């Protein structure tokens, strides 16, 4: 999908035009003269909207596909970590403790204090 010359709106920078499209990057030239680069389609999740409704629907589909893929990757990683913990394998950054009922639980060994 070609987005060059399409009008977009950014929450902070206002209206702009897609000046370049290079792989997953979009360079947008805003009315105030600023040029900013954004990751496609991620920027359309929170920051950008496009005026063209047909393209907006396609962007929403692309974004949904990216988010679903990221969820699957995270789920697989969690499953791998759980399998490793149940076999007694120590995962870097995790500390295995036993709960009151004798089951092992994984806890992050990193401090959660800010």
Image (spheres, helix red, strand yellow):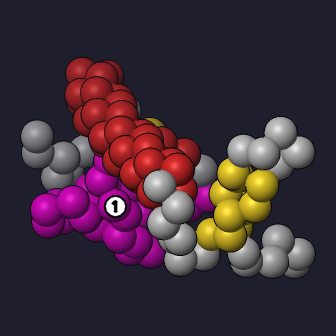
Q: Residue at x 72, y 44 (%)?
A: 103
The residue that disc 1 covers is: 39
Q: Position of residue 66 (x, y in %)?
A: 31, 42
Is 27 above or below relative to 71?
below
> Going by the picture, which residue comes out furthest to the front?
102
Q: Position of residue 109 (x, y in %)?
A: 72, 75
The image quadrant that residue 101 belongs to is: top right
How many residues crowd around disc 1 within 10 Å: few (fewer than 14), some, or many (20 or more)?
Answer: some
57 on left or right of 24: right
Image quadrant containing the C terminus:
bottom right
Q: Position of residue 33 (x, y in %)?
A: 43, 73
Q: Residue at x 44, y 49 (%)?
A: 83
Under tag 1, what secondary structure?
strand
Front-most of residues 83 and 16: 83
Front-most of residues 58 and 52: 58
Kindly report the secondary structure that dominates the magenta region of the rendered protein.
Answer: strand
In the rendered structure, does residue 33 fall within the stretch colored magenta?
yes
Please report the bounds of the magenta region as a residue range: 12-41
Q: Position of residue 92 (x, y in %)?
A: 53, 77
In the rendered structure, does residue 79 fall within the stretch colored magenta?
no
Image quadrant containing the N terminus:
top left
Residue 63 seen in the figure: no
Residue 6 seen in the figure: yes
Is 7 above or below relative to 26?
above
Is 50 above or below relative to 13?
above
């Amino acid at each position: 999908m070609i987005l060059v010359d399409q009008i977009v709106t950014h929450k902070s920078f206002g209206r702009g035009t897609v000046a370049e499209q290079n792989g997953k990057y979009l360079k947008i030239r805003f009315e105030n003269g600023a040029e900013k680069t954004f990751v496609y389609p991620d920027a359309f999740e929170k920051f950008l909207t496009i005026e063209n409704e047909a393209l907006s629907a396609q962007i929403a589909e692309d974004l949904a596909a990216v988010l679903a893929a990221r969820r699957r990757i995270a789920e697989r990683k969690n499953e791998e970590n759980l399998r490793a913990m149940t076999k007694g394998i120590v995962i870097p950054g995790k500390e295995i403790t036993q709960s009151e009922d004798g089951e092992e639980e994984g806890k992050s060994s990193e401090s959660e204090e800010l």
